[in-house]
Image (cartoon, rainbow, N blue to C red):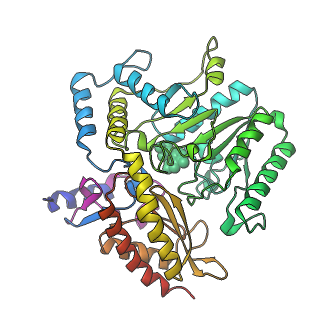
């Protein structure tokens, strides 16, 4: 790939002067220029080629620059760039049909947003108006978005600086066997005790005050924790029993990432509301939304839904969604994600867990995996503290990059989250690089 390094240098300098970056101390970062991208690869501003095992922020589910989607965006731009949400648009109608058809159960009305946080905000608003209740229960070790309510629902350190404590947001412990809050040693016990705990929280908070339980079907940035057997079904049953709306956040887990269209399918669970973003357009144009059950949609049949966004169902985004979903279907991309997880990533990561003493646990499904790094396997002391980083983790990420691999890391974890359509060959290449990086990590472990 031909990279204009002078243009990249100018972009870098302007960025440092004028761009204010998310989640960062502005003077302490050194962001990488990405000048080009194709499929599972990106090129930095110096012309270095990197295998993108991060899918950026875990959203390029069909890889970079898929020609079918770039063509659909261009065609929509040439035809009709925008119409207000109150009008009908063919790209929006078709996107809604395609998304609804893939949701579990009958979530056949779609409210479009610009991304994941606002999808969750609107899902909660719908739940509150539907139930006439206010509180929202959500899990620790979760992320639901960076806006006021969504960040308060979030159950990880990104909430701490913005915690207003006034929004009726309550957190509970999710199952996490490796660091069990329930002193469990089997998945069955973990699942059962986590459900008993959730029921206690509901009873002690007052069931009649709780509008919604929001969970990531498979928590993503917080650590890729697969719910143990029976857990999500149990949450569904508790929600039904107490008349609480069950919201599944599929912003990261959805659209093929877990090896299914939506991760709830692994657990045979139908939520009342399902939120999505990221993979719906592979991130090519921002889009999110809420898929709504008929019962909740009926609440707003004769009653006004008091919410909206200027760009709800933006035609460029919806054209990108239609092309993304069609490409995923025609090219069997969801099946590819499942197969790569089962035959390539899963076995390789199990091998890492047995060979590398710095690997505490590996877990995941599809192209959605986490490697939990530890200083000591016996004590499970993490290689970076909860909510922080460490020189060791920084060194591993830098090393991976210098060997041509872009990884997603959070606290003491390295996530293996390549595009859903990555080839087996590229997946093996990335895993081989990672294997070498873990040799270095072993030097940090007891
Ligand atoms: N929910 C989950 C599970 C996410 O992973 C994210 C983003 O990473 C969000 C919500 C927020 O989405 P957005 O950044 O598009 O607002």
Q: Where is residue 145 shown, x and y percent of the image?
A: 55, 46
**Considering the image in quadrants, where does the C terminus appear?**
bottom right
| Figure check: 377 above or below 241 | below
Residue found 61% across the figure and 68% down from its top: 386
Residue found 72% across the figure and 50% down from its top: 171
Q: Nearer the viewer, residue 242 or 228?
A: 228
Residue reaching furthest to the top: 302
Magenta run includes residue 31: yes
Q: Where is residue 160 shown, x and y percent of the image?
A: 64, 56
Q: Is residue 382 visible?
A: yes
Instruction: Decide if residue 131 is on the left or right side of residue 370.
Output: right
**Considering the image in quadrants, where does the N terminus appear?**
bottom left
Q: Is residue 417 visible?
A: no
Q: Where is residue 444 shown, x and y percent of the image?
A: 51, 85
Q: Nearer the viewer, residue 121 or 337?
A: 337
Q: Nearer the viewer, residue 26 or 185?
A: 185
Q: Where is residue 102 shown, x and y percent of the image?
A: 48, 34
Instruction: Decide if residue 412 is on the left or right side of residue 91.
Output: right
| Figure check: 135 above or below 165 | above
Magenta run includes residue 57: no
**How many numbered marks, from 0 up?**
0
Quarter location, residue 176 = bottom right
Q: Nearer the viewer, residue 293 or 50?
A: 293
| Figure check: 383 above or below 62 | below
Chain part drawn in magenta:
17-46
């Amino acid at each position: 790939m031909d990279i204009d390094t002078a243009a990249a240098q100018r972009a870098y300098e302007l960025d440092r002067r004028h761009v204010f970056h998310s989640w960062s101390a502005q003077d302490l970062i050194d962001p990488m220029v990405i000048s080009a991208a194709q499929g599972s690869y990106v090129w930095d501003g110096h012309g270095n080629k990197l295998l993108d095992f991060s899918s950026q922020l875990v959203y390029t589910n069909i890889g970079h620059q898929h020609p079918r989607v770039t063509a659909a965006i261009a065609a929509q731009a040439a035809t009709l760039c925008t119409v207000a949400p109150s009008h009908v648009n063919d790209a929006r109608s078709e996107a809604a049909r395609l998304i609804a058809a893939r949701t579990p159960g009958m979530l056949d009305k779609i409210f479009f947003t610009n991304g994941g946080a606002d999808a969750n905000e609107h899902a909660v608003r719908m739940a509150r108006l539907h139930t006439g209740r206010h509180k929202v229960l959500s899990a620790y070790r979760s992320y639901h978005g960076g806006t006021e309510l969504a960040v308060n629902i979030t159950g990880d350190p990104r909430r701490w600086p913005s915690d207003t404590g006034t929004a009726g947001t309550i957190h509970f412990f999710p199952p996490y066997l490796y660091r069990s809050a329930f002193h469990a040693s089997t998945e069955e016990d973990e699942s059962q005790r986590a459900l008993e705990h959730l029921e206690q929280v509901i009873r002690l908070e007052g069931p009649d005050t709780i509008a919604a339980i929001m969970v990531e079907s498979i928590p993503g940035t917080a650590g890729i924790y697969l719910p143990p057997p029976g857990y999500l079904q149990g949450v569904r049953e508790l929600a039904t029993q107490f008349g609480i709306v069950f919201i599944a956040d599929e912003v990261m887990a959805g659209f093929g990432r877990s090896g299914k269209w939506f991760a709830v399918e692994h657990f045979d669970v139908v939520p009342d509301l399902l939120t999505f973003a990221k993979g719906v357009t592979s991130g090519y144009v921002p889009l999110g939304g809420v898929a709504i059950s008929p019962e909740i949609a009926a609440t707003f049949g004769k009653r006004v839904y008091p919410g909206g966004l200027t760009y709800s169902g933006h035609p460029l985004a919806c054209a990108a969604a239609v092309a993304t979903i069609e490409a995923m279907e025609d090219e069997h991309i969801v099946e590819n994600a499942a197969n790569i997880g089962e035959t390539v990533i899963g076995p390789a990561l199990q091998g890492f867990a047995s060979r590398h003493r710095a690997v505490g646990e590996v877990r995941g499904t599809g192209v959605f995996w986490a490697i939990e790094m530890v200083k000591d396997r016996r004590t499970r002391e993490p290689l970076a503290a909860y909510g922080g980083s460490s020189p060791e983790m920084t060194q591993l990420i830098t090393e991976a990059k210098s060997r041509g691999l872009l990884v997603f890391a959070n606290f003491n974890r390295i996530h293996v989250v390549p595009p859903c359509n990555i080839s087996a060959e590229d997946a093996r290449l990335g895993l081989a690089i990672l294997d070498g990086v873990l040799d270095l990590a072993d030097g940090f472990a007891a």
